[in-house]
Image: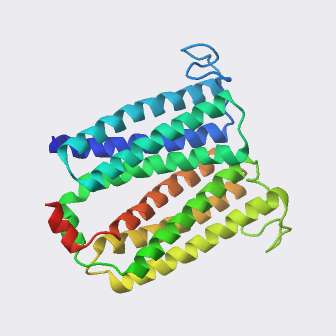
């Protein structure tokens, strides 16, 4: 079974990543009601009409359904193969719970009108579902290497710092989704300034957009501090945190510039999708750091 778990882990993560991008495509193209107010049918049919909006929305539903089946199979197999492992059990339940939750929220958004604040939760819950699968996949892929990577413990202060920064990052992600659902993406017509001002009038859509930009900048500074600390303290004893901290900072900088591309290229589809791709990968790696801060060399011996 272990021979099949690793390729299945890669497949499960990949399909969940595609679900994230497909959801962003639905939002970007305003295809959320491409199937009308029907669910699971599409405008009363199992096979949708050949309109762009209906096809995009229907494909998103289809991909989500296939991803759900793959993730369920992957989670059940992990649960059985690593029987008694609390980390596997928790990650499997975490991923499955948020897959179900984001599916219910997506269906309710089609059937009943939702506010922008509620619609923004859909991306956040989808991100948590992806993260659960991503972390479980990394457990499978890195299990044999964990003892080599985890050769020292981390301080409680650094652990709290990483968890705090990650929770803050989730808030920035939610605010970004709120920007999209309130139509505030072009409230500032230029970048990095906002309508030619360093600090614009903080009201309406401009205020929403500017606060999101400010939040992203603060996140970049926090991840820079995290990387500097990890390079100084973990280069030889915690290769997991060392590598993840560098990757996180590189990705957050890419995320900041991709946000600028969204504005400079006037909401071009590719720029928007790139923005969603980067934040999905970034948040997954940040959650990986959170999980790894809980591990010690002693915990690795107990897992054998």
Query: Residue at the spot x=31%, y=69% of the render?
Result: 240
Depth check, front residue: 100 or 12: 100
Q: Picture coordinates of residue 269 (x, y %)?
A: 63, 44
Query: Residue at the spot x=16%, y=43% of the render?
Result: 3
Query: Residue at the spot x=44%, y=78% of the render?
Result: 227
Q: In the rendered view of the protein, which quadrant contains the N terminus?
A: top left
Q: In the rendered view of the protein, which quadrant contains the C terminus?
A: bottom left
Horizontal arrangement in the rendering, residue 198 relative to residue 93 (left or right):
right
- How is the model colour-coded? rainbow
Q: Picture coordinates of residue 258 (x, y %)?
A: 60, 59
Depth check, front residue: 38 or 225: 38
Depth check, front residue: 138 or 250: 138
Q: In this figure, what is the number of numbered marks?
A: 0
Q: Picture coordinates of residue 124 (x, y %)?
A: 56, 50
- Tell me which corner region of the image, top left, top right, bottom left or bottom right, holds residue 204: bottom right
Horizontal arrangement in the rendering, residue 286 relative to residue 182 (left or right):
left
Residue 197 shows in the view: yes
Query: Residue at the spot x=29%, y=56% of the render?
Result: 87
Q: Picture coordinates of residue 199 (x, y %)?
A: 80, 73
Horizontal arrangement in the rendering, residue 3 relative to residue 184 (left or right):
left
- Tell me which corner region of the image, top left, top right, bottom left or bottom right, holds residue 74: top left
Vertical side of 48 occupied by 7: above or below = below
Residue 254 shows in the view: no
């Amino acid at each position: 079974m272990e021979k099949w778990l690793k390729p299945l882990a890669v497949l499960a993560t990949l399909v969940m990543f595609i679900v994230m991008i497909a959801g962003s495509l639905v939002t970007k193209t305003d295809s959320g009601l491409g199937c009308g107010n029907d669910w699971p049918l599409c405008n009363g049919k199992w096979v949708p009409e050949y309109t762009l909006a209906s096809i995009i929305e229907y494909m998103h539903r289809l991909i989500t359904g296939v991803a759900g089946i793959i993730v369920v199979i992957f989670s059940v197999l992990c649960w059985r193969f690593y029987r008694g492992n609390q980390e596997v059990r928790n990650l499997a339940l975490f991923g499955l719970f948020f897959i179900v939750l984001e599916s219910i929220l997506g269906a309710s958004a089609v059937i009943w009108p939702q506010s922008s604040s509620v619609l923004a939760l859909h991306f956040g819950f989808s991100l948590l579902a992806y993260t659960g699968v991503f972390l479980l996949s990394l457990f499978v892929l890195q299990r044999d290497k964990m003892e080599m990577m985890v050769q020292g413990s981390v301080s409680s202060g650094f652990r709290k710092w990483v968890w705090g920064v990650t929770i803050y990052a989730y808030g920035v992600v939610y605010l970004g989704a709120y920007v999209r659902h309130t139509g505030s993406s072009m409230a500032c017509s230029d970048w990095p300034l906002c309508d030619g001002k360093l600090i614009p009038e903080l009201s309406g859509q401009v205020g929403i957009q500017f606060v999101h930009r400010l939040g992203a900048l603060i996140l970049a500074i926090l991840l820079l501090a995290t990387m500097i600390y990890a390079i100084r303290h973990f280069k030889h004893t915690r290769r997991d945190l060392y590598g993840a901290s560098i990757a996180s900072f590189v990705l957050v900088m890419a995320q900041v510039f991709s946000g600028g591309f969204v504005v400079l290229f006037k909401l071009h589809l590719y720029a928007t999708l790139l923005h969603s791709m980067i934040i999905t990968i970034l948040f997954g790696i940040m959650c990986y750091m959170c999980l790894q801060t809980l591990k010690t060399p002693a915990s690795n011996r107990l897992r054998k």
